[in-house]
Amino acid sequence: MADKGKDMLENLDDIVLVESESENVVEKVNLLGDEIVARDDVPLRVPEVGMKFNDENELFDYYKKFAYAEGFPVRKKNSKKDNDDVLRYVTMTCSREGKRSSTTIGSLKSQPTIQTGCKARLIASMDSRGIWRINTVNLEHNHKTSPSKSRLYRCNRKLSAHVKRRLQVNDIAGILLHKSFNSAVVEAGGYENMTYMEKDRRNYVEQVRRLRLGEGDAAAIQSYFSKMQASFARFYFCIDLDEDSRLKSVFWADNRSRQVYKEFGDVVTFDTTYLTNKYDMPFAPFVGINHHGQSTLLGCGLVSNEDTDTFVWLFRTWLQCMHEKAPQGIITDQDKAMQNAIAIVFPDTKHRWCLWHILKKLPEKFGYHVDKGSVFHAIHSLVYDSQFVEESEDGWRVMIDTYDLHDNAWLSGVYDNRCRWVPCYFKTSFWAGMSTTQRSECMNAFFDGYVHSKTSLKQFVEQYERALKNKVEKEIQADFKSFSQMVPCATRYEMEKQFQAVYTIAKFREVQEEFTGKLYCDLISTSEGSSGTTYEVCEEQINDEQSHGKTFFVSFQREDCQIVCSCHLFEFRGIICRHMIVVLIRNGIKHVPDRYILRRWRRDMMKAKLQVYKNGSNMNAKWGVRVPPKEIGQRHDQVMLALTHISFKYLNGHNIA
């Protein structure tokens, strides 16, 4: 024991002063490690009757360090004051003293307990001079002790002021707690050097958040939104309350989202499957796609229920926020309540189901099938390779017969609604290339660094604001890249130069891929008809080192340069396809008409139109909704500035250029 103690002398940091009753000297005693070790060969000291301390805190500090060295937890059990309200007696015990209440005996879900009825303790009193003296000591425990586990007992865990400050800063910055803790472990040199556990950090942060929230949830969030509306022009929010004035749902959108919607609100995705916060309110973002092909937020809500009435409220609120302009298309999952609400609020909007949500269910629905691999392949081929409705439906019937799937209720259900999710039924409409709600999932992934399941309502909207600013910065950088850089053309066709001159880098790369893909296309035949010339184009498609030819049909009218391909890439994504390029080149077309160069993909796209508002707002008592003021000022003409003047025009309603 002595040798072990000597080996630890070089690492003695915590020293306590102990006065001996028999000797009028002060000894420096180290209280760390597996044993209590004296420095410079001072005799080992353990708690004993007669030891004196200057005050009660010094006594408790000493006993804690002794317990740490021995490997057991401690706590103050009893304290007694005199008639002058001065503390005179104190009992300090092993934290495993006492026993759990008998009411928990026999419970099928009883929780583990630390209490074992341990009698180890220390009793002390203060004399007339204010000196504390140990009167009783019991060092016997009825359980094992372990110095190596001392750091894990609650009494020995603490967060320093530095750690607390860092936690608050990281929480405001949106850094997840587990990432913050892992960084602290590395900084400390390992878990064994940590003075706290991860749950201590989490408990502290949640406490700070509660203190930050302060007032009731509904009142706090409305107060926050009111502040945002006063600070930022045209910040919009709506709160839905129940009959007892309890918060049901909330929606908000900053001015930038409202302006972006005017340019990129043609197609949106809506998904509530991402995250529910600590109040079990699903996050419901409206997501579009900008001119760089990036996800862009068009407002979002938190909803307490996922029924038709709730979605009707949310969709109507969003529509009001977006100047009563409904989207051309909306993508959701198969939720029936959503479908009903969309039919009510957006009767003229095309509604599609998320293809990914459907296909991901295949293993669940056909995992039992002896030919499940073949079934998966057949469904994927029908979904992705069918150009025409007739082709898809004929192939579906063959698949049902081949694998005897007539009695599969799920498959029958999705087939009855095939026009909502099989691409060949809707690819003639513009969807900005969005096939699934993975646009929403991409946006959700963006918010992963800022919000989580324990985020409070007020924290949620605050973190949303920070995350959105980060998203805006990414778009600024993409704007700058498209302004300051140019991707060289891959061919010498003037048509490619047309797109190079006006499209963003991201979208020009998509166009360029079609120009290079032209190399794999051959004109097979032509036929004349009343609607112009139809060209048969065969494209060699190479997948997994195997190639096969696929035929596409391109209709072309020379008089007005109207061109349509059976792949409908242009109608669906707004990108001219390689099959069309082959036909245009064949006919000597050097410049495509402007209708094939979409405004929404241009690099000089401006998303904001400055509008003047008067201050003021009104309250709709029936809905419990705060409604932004009506427009009463003059509208400025849309500012179509070249990117040479853009450092980014409007952030949360303010021109910061």
Image (tube, rainbow, N blue to C red):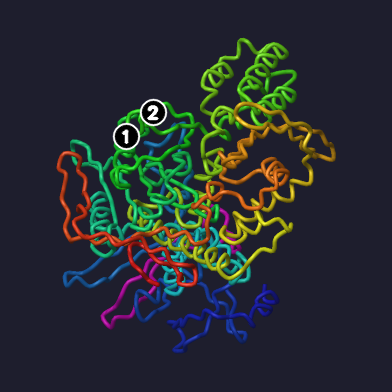
Disc 2 packing (10 Å; few <14; some 14–19; many ≥20): some
Q: Residues within 10 Å of mark 1 (few under 14, many from 20)?
A: some
Quarter of the rendering containing residue 69: bottom right
Seen in the image, is 85 located left or right of residue 499?
left
Report the residue marked by disc 2: 337
Q: Secondary structure at mark 2?
A: helix
Q: Is residue 316 magenta?
A: no
Magenta segment: 120-149
Q: Percent from the top left, x then y, of residue 135?
A: 38, 70
The residue to which callout 1 is attached is 310
Q: Is residue 123 magenta?
A: yes
- Where residue 190 appears, as percent x and y from the top left, is 63, 67
Name the residue type under label 2: Ala
Residue 657: give x, y in percent of width and height. 40, 72
Q: Reading the chain from its start, which is encountered first: label 1 or label 2?
A: 1
Q: Out of 288 and 529, give the one closest to the viewer.
A: 529
Residue 159 seen in the figure: no
Residue 227 placement: quadrant: bottom left
- Number of disc labels: 2
Q: Secondary structure at mark 1?
A: helix
Residue 549 in sight here: yes
Q: Quadrant of residue 358?
A: top right
Q: Is residue 233 above or below residue 19?
A: above
Residues 318 and 519: in front is: 519
Between marks 1 and 2, how big is the CA–CA gap?
A: 9 Å
On the rendered structure, is 221 left or right of 153? Answer: left
Q: Are marks 1 and 2 in contact (CB under 8 Å)?
A: yes
